[in-house]
Image: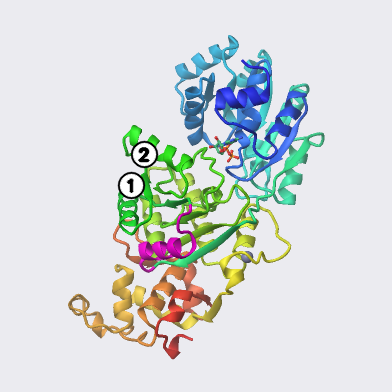
Amino acid sequence: MPGKPLDVLNTVFGYDRFRGQQQDVIDELLAGRDALVLMPTGGGKSLCYQIPSLLRPGVGIVISPLIALMQDQVSALHQLGVNAAFLNSTLTGEEARSIENRLRDDQLDLLYIAPERLNSARTLSLLDNLNIALFAIDEAHCVSQWGHDFRADYLQLSMLHERYPSIPRIALTATADERTRQEIISRLALDQAKLFVSSFDRPNIRYRIVQKQNARQQLLQFIQSEHFGDAGIVYCLSRKKVESTAEWLQSKGIRALPYHAGMDNAARQQHQHRFLMEEGLVIVATIAFGMGIDKPNVRFVAHLDLPKSIEAYYQETGRAGRDGLPADAWMAYGLQDVITLQQMLANSNADESHKRLEYHKLDAMLALCEEVGCRRRALLSYFGDRLADDCGNCDTCLEPVKTWDGTVAAQQALSCIYRTGQRFGVNYLIDVLRGKETERLKHFGHDRQSTFGIGKDIDEKQWRSVFRQLVAKGLVTVDIEGYGSLRLDESCRTVLRGEQQLMLRRDLSTESGKRSKGAV
Ligand code: ADP
Ligand code: ZN
């Protein structure tokens, strides 16, 4: 092993220089002291404990609640030639014993372990006889009972300090609020730890989320009018859409290249290489693109599909403007995005608690899309980072959102869902509300139904916006079977009973269209 942090960064991880406070954090641990690191997702927390684990004698013990990710992290380390392993409940007894043997033989540099596993008497007696480089407590906010990620097993981690007083500890989190920070310090006995706080704000990035109409066309317009000839990344959900979007942009004179995990390796590598080396290329990609990409002059990141979480959105948009010059984060979003993501979640094989967490994250992402105040404020507050004033550099600051009292419209929409049996999708429901006499509608007898035509004075676009916001607010859910039919959520009752006033966002896109007086 080479001897200096920078050498390890270069030779093992293949990066040129440290980012932000990485070097300082690493030095602190190498000096044998504790550290508490608050850094945004994607900020590069892992290297802060990985490099000292390689440089200090013994094995670095990484405590993480994210069992699902351990396998990936360890595989990635293997590819770099690092001796790493994990211990969690997914292993068979035999596999676990083999890893314990490697630990005893001092063959590992990094061990990822779930907190409940660490707390067991068996593991602790194993650790007692090992040479340990450091303890890294990842997702340290899990120790906070106020946060939504509380894990009882984290509380016991304070024993590390008592049991192994001379071994440096590093706690890491992407949650930055003061209360959580204080809780981490007191519960993990980190009062001696040096605090490293990175701001989450990327002031040079201008956030903008527009309503989807013809997304491709809107994207082209955005690129042509604001970023012609600039380097940029366009994110799409599916490989197929990546291909078709790249082709279409090319046909419109934009130098665009596709990138996704289904392409053959050589082509993919070549496109990535060209994007990094040439100027003014647009890469159209799935989220497979970007891990470790460090191109300073990416002028825009565009999303044609909704990211699954604010963490993902922040990380992906964060690839813009690393040089500190003005850059744009642009996204087009619509009801179908919400439906697609909710269906993907519902149909995934993840266990219930994991699904619940994912829903929670998606809801937060939707709330950001529907935000009527400063977009940056909302984004940063999600990470516990408070902004004193509105930013003046996001869409809602530059062009304040208008709201309207949508209570009656919402009641009409909700009753329409209810009275048609909670079996239909948004297009059908809008037809009923607007009193359109289609064959299908007549076939079901819905032209004789009491909500037929009651929403004539609101145009189609605005109805879409109403339904989208009802879904985003969780008042309406999307059928999990995959047909996109809408159902009422328990929580919509207060609206139906008139106990809750509903202020809705007036989409800019519906402003320009013909507007009827009933909608105001
Ligand atoms: P976090 O745990 O804070 O979310 P990660 O440790 O996963 O972030 O790092 C995010 C991405 O940034 C990874 O792809 C990582 O390889 C990359 N990265 C981290 N540090 C550097 C660096 N100094 N130079 C270039 N890329 C880096
Ligand atoms: Zn703002």
- Asked whether residue 225 is drawn in magenta, I would say yes
Percent across and percent down for residue 198 are 70, 45
Residue 278 figure quarter: top left
Disc marking residue 509: none
Q: Quadrant of the N terminus?
A: top right
Asked whether the residues under the numbered discs 1 and 2 touch, taking CB atoms below 8 Å apart as contact, a structural biologist would say yes
- Residue 339 x/y as whole percent: 38, 60
- Whether residue 153 is situated above or below residue 85 in the rendered picture: below
Callout 1: SS: helix
- Residue 193 rendering spot, x and y as whole percentages: 78, 34
The residue depicted at 40 percent of the width and 46 percent of the height is 286
Amino acid type assigned to the residue bearing label 2 in the image: Ala
Q: Main secondary structure of the magenta part?
A: helix
Q: Residue 413, position in %: x, y?
A: 39, 77
The front one of 317 and 472 is: 317
Report the residue marked by disc 1.
239
Q: Quadrant for ligand 2?
A: bottom right
Viewed as shown, does residue 442 lie left or right of 203?
left
Task: Report how far apart the C-alphas of labels 1 and 2 lie in the structure.
Answer: 8 Å
Q: Decide which of 388, 496 is in the foreground and name it.
A: 388
Q: Does residue 124 appear in this view?
A: no
Res 29 quadrant in image: top right
Magenta residues span 213-230
**Amino acid under disc 1:** Arg
Q: Which residue is located at x 55 percent, y 15 percent?
A: 100
Residue located beneath label 2 in the image: 261
Q: Earlier in the sequence, mark 1 or mark 2?
A: 1
Q: Is residue 445 left or right of residue 5?
A: left
The secondary structure type at the circle numbered 2 is: loop
Write the residue at 29% across / 60% down: 483
Q: Is residue 487 above or below residue 365?
A: below
Q: Quadrant of residue 512?
A: bottom left
